[in-house]
Image (spheres, rainbow, N blue to C red):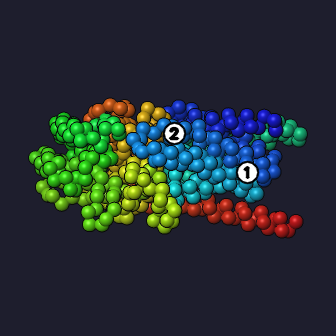
Amino acid sequence: MRKKIWLFLILSAFGLAFAFSPLSLRFLAYFALVSLFWVIENYSYKKTFWSAWFFGGLFGLFHLWWLYFLVVPVVPMTKFLLILGVTILFAYLGLYTALFAVITKYTGLIFAPFIWAGLEFIRTKTEIGFPWGLLGYTQTPSIPFIQIASIFGVYGISAWVVWINLLIYWIVKEWHSQKTPDFQLRILRWVLTLFLSVLIPYSYGRLRLKPNQDWFKVAIIQPNVSPNEKGDRESLKKNQSDLINLTQKAILARPSLIIYPETATLTDITQDKGFQAVLQKLVDSNKVYLLTGTPVYDQGVSGRYYNGAVLFEPGTELRQDYKKIHPVPFSEKIPYADRIPLFKKLETVDMGDMTPGKIFRVFNFPYGNLSVLICFESIFPDLTQEFTKRGADLLINITNDGWFGKTFGPYQHAELSILRTVENGVPLVRCANNGVSFIVDPYGRVLNKTSLFTQTVMIDNLPKPIKPTFFRRYGNIFAIVSLGLIGLGLVLRWIRKRNK
């Protein structure tokens, strides 16, 4: 087994990557950590650390390989920094797996689900938070199973997947040992535990699922503008013309709300009085609300640039707005550049100069309150829960995934937002410049969606939100408890060693 373990780790990392969208071989997630558990039980701490780091880094590479091929029109220095940053990212992600393995070896396998969930929670924090590829996301299409996210969040699903892996490991271990007379009984015990571990969340999910009730009609504008064309003057004129034409087409269906994607206006709509007047006229004459993504330049404070969203309302020129709170690390903001002068020097003309917003804006809307998640803000459970806790009944994710090109990136990014609906019990509308755009109900069911790299208008009725979930009211209690259990496991192990 020792000679083959590296092969098993490589295959496991590869298989885990295949469990995510768009390949979606979800069942592979249930076996992905089995070989790692063998390493934890049979190797020294040093070998466990490096083996787990190798597994985690390799999974990052297999899962996020497409980051090397971003369609980003930048200067050579920025391109170099992006490639370097992606490589460091894989090593960084592997470090969490290594920590998981070492802590699990110290505390005992029984703590493994909580250690994994706790470390995933930590991974979302700070300015370099990157909760992409969380284990729980492998189960997103399994609608009954993901309903536990309404209580435990995505971290609870991750812990459940780790638990399933652990049970399978124990079954395989007992089967191979066969050294005790009662090994068959022991295997039966673990098989029964596995059966109940699947049955209980599945039954809860089936009981929780209910039919939807229609709320109001929404129109999603997907202009399909190439990222390489968006700064050109001619493409600016064409893009704004396309937006107007698509909007007029959408108005024929009489929606209550029209949505444009991230930075759809290209210019700062709060200062571009010409295009602003055109949109306001459309809104006033058709009594429809229009939400658009827009860059925002603060002329009053030198150097302030935001990624924002503005809501146009009929009958008034007073507009509610939102500024993106969590910029993409390195791409939009160099982490800690405002505190570490050396990091400030990494900023280039096209990378790292965005200012984070500070206000969790909840927009007033006739049918209920709504909040906007810009780009990868939709993958942060805490951020989203803060909006719903403040009263948002609808989440709108506006994004531009054209940078990912024709890779796995757009599919992965789209799927990551779906669990926010289950966690909070609210519907979500995703409007992407190049796709995938979709509507998701409060149970995580995708009701309608567009294809990638098509210019289209999608019009459909939104489902109503359901009553606030446990997660919406109390947030990541499970993740915090998991951190507490990690501490408990460390203390208990220390006490046992001291007593010996």
- Amino acid type of the residue that numbered disc 2 sits on in the rendered structure: Tyr
Quadrant of residue 324 within the rendered picture: bottom left
Can you say whether 448 is above or below 329 in the image?
A: above
Q: Where residue 278 is drawn, which disc sits there?
A: none
Can you say whether 414 is above or below 113 in the image?
A: above
Q: Nearer the viewer, residue 300 or 479?
A: 300
Quadrant into which the N terminus falls: top right
The residue carrying mark 2 is 68
Q: Position of residue 395 (x, y in %)?
A: 36, 51
Q: Position of residue 280 (x, y in %)?
A: 15, 50
Q: CA distance from mark 1 to mark 2?
A: 27 Å
Q: Secondary structure at mark 1?
A: helix
- Amino acid type of the residue that numbered disc 1 sits on in the rendered structure: Phe
Q: Name the residue located 76 percent from the left edge and 53 percent from the top edge.
A: 105
The residue carrying mark 1 is 49
Q: Secondary structure at mark 2?
A: helix
Q: Position of residue 479 (x, y in %)?
A: 57, 58
Q: Name the residue located 25 percent from the left edge and 49 percent from the top edge.
A: 267
Quadrant of residue 238 within the rendered picture: top left
